Amino acid sequence: MVAKLAVFGVLAPIVGACASVTVYYQVNQHHLASSTNSAALADYTGAAAYDPTVLNPPPTPNPPIPIRFELELRNGGTPGLSITQTGAFFGFSIEMSVVDQVLGRNSTVLQVPFLNLMANLAKRAGAVRIRVGGNTQEGAVLVDSTSSGRILEKDISGVSNPTQTPPLDYTRDLIYMMGNISHLVPVDWFLGIPFNDTEHFRLAVAEVGQQVLGRRLIGLQVGNEPDLYSRHGHRPSTYSPFDYFGEFGALVAAMSGEAHGANQHLLIGPNIATGDWTPEMVWNTGFVDSYSSNLAYLAVEHYPADNCFAQFGIGTPADPQELFASYLTHAAGRAIIEPYLNSTAFAQEKGKRLMMFETNTASCGGFPGISDSFGAALWALDYGMQMAHSNFSGALFHVGGQNVFYNPFTPPPTNQSTFRQWTIGPVYYSALVMAEALGPSNGARVLDLEANGGNEYTPAYGIYEGGNPVRILLFNYITDSSGANDYTAMISIAAGDRTPRQVKIKRLLASSVSQKGNFTWAGQTFGSNFGSDGRLEGTEVIETVTCEAQCLIKVPAPGAALVFLTDGALAEVESGPTTTFPTTALTRTMNTATIDPAVLETSNGHTGMNAKGRLGSTSKGSVSGSKPARGRLRTGYAAAVILSYLLATTLVAGLF
Ligand SMILES: *[C@@H]1O[C@H](CO)[C@@H](O)[C@H](O)[C@H]1NC(C)=O
Ligand SMILES: *[C@@H]1O[C@H](CO)[C@@H](O)[C@H](O)[C@H]1NC(C)=O
Ligand SMILES: *[C@@H]1O[C@H](CO)[C@@H](O)[C@H](O)[C@H]1NC(C)=O
Ligand SMILES: *[C@@H]1O[C@H](CO)[C@@H](O)[C@H](O)[C@H]1NC(C)=O
Ligand SMILES: *[C@@H]1O[C@H](CO)[C@@H](O)[C@H](O)[C@H]1NC(C)=O
Ligand SMILES: *[C@@H]1O[C@H](CO)[C@@H](O)[C@H](O)[C@H]1NC(C)=O
Ligand SMILES: *[C@@H]1O[C@H](CO)[C@@H](O)[C@H](O)[C@H]1NC(C)=O
C-alpha cells in the first residue's frame, strides 16, 4: 500500500483505510517530536519493540464523570445479549515470516516462554487460536529444504513489491513445529493458502497442514486483503469483488480430490482490509450462499489508524501524543466495529461466524507510546469485548517482529536470546483478562451495559451464562492519581434479593495509561522489557467484597476490574488443566533438553503447582543456587537457561 501510494501520489485514503504493513527488517524509526516525558528519546535507535517513548496521559475529563452509578442486571430475560462466545475469542495473528522467532526455531526447539504464554490463556479459556500468515503467506513456497537449514528463508534482496514483503521459502518442519506446540498446549491454527497466482495454486500448505495438524487446523485463509491487491500491483486495476468470487471458486475446484477432503470446508474469506471494498460489496456477489459449504468462517481485517509516515516517510504524519486520547474512550472500539454491524447480522442470518482476522492499534507497526502503553491494554480489552458484544466470533491481534510497537509479546533479538527474556506487551494482558471474562464454557454471552449513562470513560460489560450474569468487567480510562476520578459501581441483580452476598474481584492496574510494562493483573505481572519467561510473577490478589442490597465496586483511574458474581464463575477460570511440557526449547547455543515439567508448569500463583504438590518455582530467580556457566548468563533470565542449569548434564560445553 505504502510504496504504491508514493508512486502514484494518492495520499488521501491512508487514514481509515489501513492495510496491514509488516516491516520485515529494520528501517530507521523517525520519532515524532511531541513526546514529552522521555529523556534522550531522539537518540533512541534501537528496535521499536523496546522504544522508550512515554506520552502524557490525557487530561481528566471536563465535565467530570459521575463517580457513583448503579448497575442493575437481572437473571434471565435480558435482551440484546451476544451470540455464545468461546473463551478463545481473543487470539493472535503471527506474521509467517517471524514464526521461527516467536514459536520456536524448529519442530524440536520450541520457545518455552511462548508455550507458557499460550498455556496461561488455555488454562483460563480452554484453548488458544493462532493464525500463521499475513502478507508473507501470499508468496510463500513449501520447499524440501533451505540452504541455511532453517525452517524459513527470506530473500530480502528479492523484495520487490510495495509492502516490502520478501519471498518466503519454508519447510515442512514449520508445520511440524505447530503440531508439536499443539501436543503441549491446546492451540488451534489458521493457515493461509498463497493467492498470488490463481492459475497455479500452491496447495501444499493446506495438504501438509491437514496431515500434521488434523483437527487443530481450523481454517484456511483464501487471499489476504484482496481489496488492496490492485492498489499493491498484485492484480489489474479492474480487480473487483466479482473477480475475487471467481478466484475463490477456482480454488475450491482445485481442492477437489482426496488430499483436500477436509480442507474444502475450512476456507475463510473474504479477508478484506475494508480499504477499497466494503464487506457488503463482497456479500452482494452471492459469495456466502455460493460457497456456504466451503466457508468455515467469514473474516475481515482492520486497523483503526496507521503509522506509515514514521515508518516509511509516506502518507500523513501522525502525532502519537495527539492521537493518544482517541484510543482512551469507549468510542474507540465502537468506531472500528460500526462498519461491520450489518455484516455480523448478515453472518448470523447465513449461519456463519465473522472474525476480525488481523487487527491492532495501528498498521505500519503501531505508535510509540500508545501501542506499548497501559492505555493500549484497556483499549484492546474494550475493543475485544465490544467485538464479542457485537457478534463477531473472534479477533486476532497481530504480532510482528522487533520493529513494531504493538506486539502482544516479543522474543528477544535472536542474538540475545540466551541472556535476555521476552517482553510482554499490553495487548497480551488484554487477552488474559478477556480469557477470564469469557471463561472456558463456550456458552458466554456478552452485553455492553451502557454503564454510567453511556459515559465514554467508564464502560462496562456483563458476561452471561444460561441467561444469568456471571461476571462483570468494568473500565476506567482516566488517569488521576488523586483519587478524584476513581468511581464506584453499585451493582445489584434484580430482583433485589438475588444480589450475591459477596463477590470476588481481580484488577488490571498501572499507575497511568502512559505506563510501559509492569502492569498487574490480580497483583501479578510479566515485568517490563526483557522481563518475562511467560509466567505471571508475584502473589495473586483476589479481593472479596461483601454486598448488601448492592455490591459496591471501586474502579481506580486508570484500571479495569473483573467482578466474579459467583464462586463458580471464578472457579471455572482457575481450574483449567495445568499444562506440563515434556520436551523442548532452547536457543542457539544449546541443545534440546528435557525439562522438568514441574518447573515449566504454568501457574497463576496459587493453583497449578500447589494443586499438584510438585516442586517448582513460579518466581523468577528463585530456582537458584546454580552458578552461571558463563558470566553473561544469569539465573534471573530465560527459563531455558535456568532449566539448563538444573539439568547441567544436558548443557553443551562451551556456550557462545
Ligand atoms: C532444530 O534446531 C536445532 C538447533 O539448531 C538442531 O540441532 C535440530 O536438529 C533442529 N531440528 C530439526 C528437526 O531440524
Ligand atoms: C507467486 O509467488 C511465487 C513464489 O514467491 C513466485 O515464484 C511466482 O512468480 C508468483 N507468481 C505471480 C503470478 O506473481
Ligand atoms: C515434534 O516433531 C518431530 C518432527 O520433527 C516429531 O518427530 C516429534 O515426534 C514431534 N514431537 C512431539 C512431542 O510431537
Ligand atoms: C447489509 O448487508 C446486506 C447484504 O450485503 C445488504 O443487502 C444491505 O443493504 C446492507 N445494509 C446496510 C444498511 O448496509
Ligand atoms: C447480536 O446478536 C443477537 C442475537 O441475534 C442480537 O440479539 C443482538 O442484538 C446482536 N447484537 C448486536 C450489537 O448486533
Ligand atoms: C545483535 O545484532 C545486532 C544487529 O546485527 C547488533 O547490532 C548487536 O550488536 C548484536 N548484539 C549482540 C549482543 O551480539
Ligand atoms: C518494573 O518493576 C521493576 C521491579 O519493581 C523495576 O525495577 C523496574 O524499574 C520497573 N520498570 C519500569 C519500566 O517501570
Image (cartoon, helix red, strand yellow):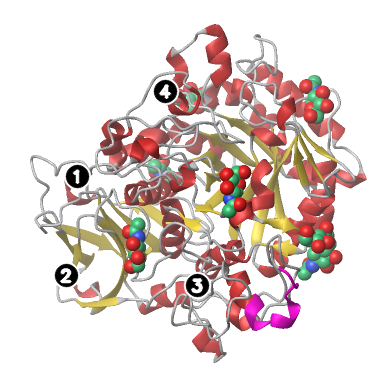
Alpha carbon of mark 3 to alpha carbon of mark 4: how far? 43 Å
Q: Quadrant of ligand 7?
A: bottom left
Q: Residues within 10 Å of mark 1 (few under 14, many from 20)?
A: some
Amino acid type, residue under disc 1 in the picture: Asn
Answer yes or no: is residue 90 visible: yes
Disc 4 marks which residue?
A: 15
Disc 3 marks which residue?
A: 636
User: Which quarter of the rendering shows the C terminus?
Assistant: bottom right
Amino acid type, residue under disc 2 in the picture: Gln
Disc 1 marks which residue?
A: 455
Q: Quadrant of residue 72?
A: bottom left
**Residue beneath the point at 76% across and 68% down:** 591
Residue 650 among those drawn in magenta? yes
Q: Is residue 618 left or right of residue 450?
A: right
User: Which quarter of the rendering shows the N terminus?
Assistant: top right
Q: Are marks 3 and 4 in contact (CB under 8 Å)?
A: no
Answer yes or no: is residue 471 visible: no
N-terminal-most mark, 3 or 2: 2
Amino acid type, residue under disc 3 in the picture: Gly
N-terminal-most mark, 1 or 3: 1
Alpha carbon of mark 1 to alpha carbon of mark 3: how far? 44 Å
Q: Residues within 10 Å of mark 2 (few under 14, many from 20)?
A: many
Asked if the beta carbon under badge 1 is closer than 8 A to the nearest atom of ligand 5, the reply is no
Q: Position of residue 53 (x, y in %)?
A: 34, 42
Alpha carbon of mark 4 to alpha carbon of mark 1: how far? 26 Å
What span is colored magenta in the figure? 644-654
N-terminal-most mark, 4 or 1: 4
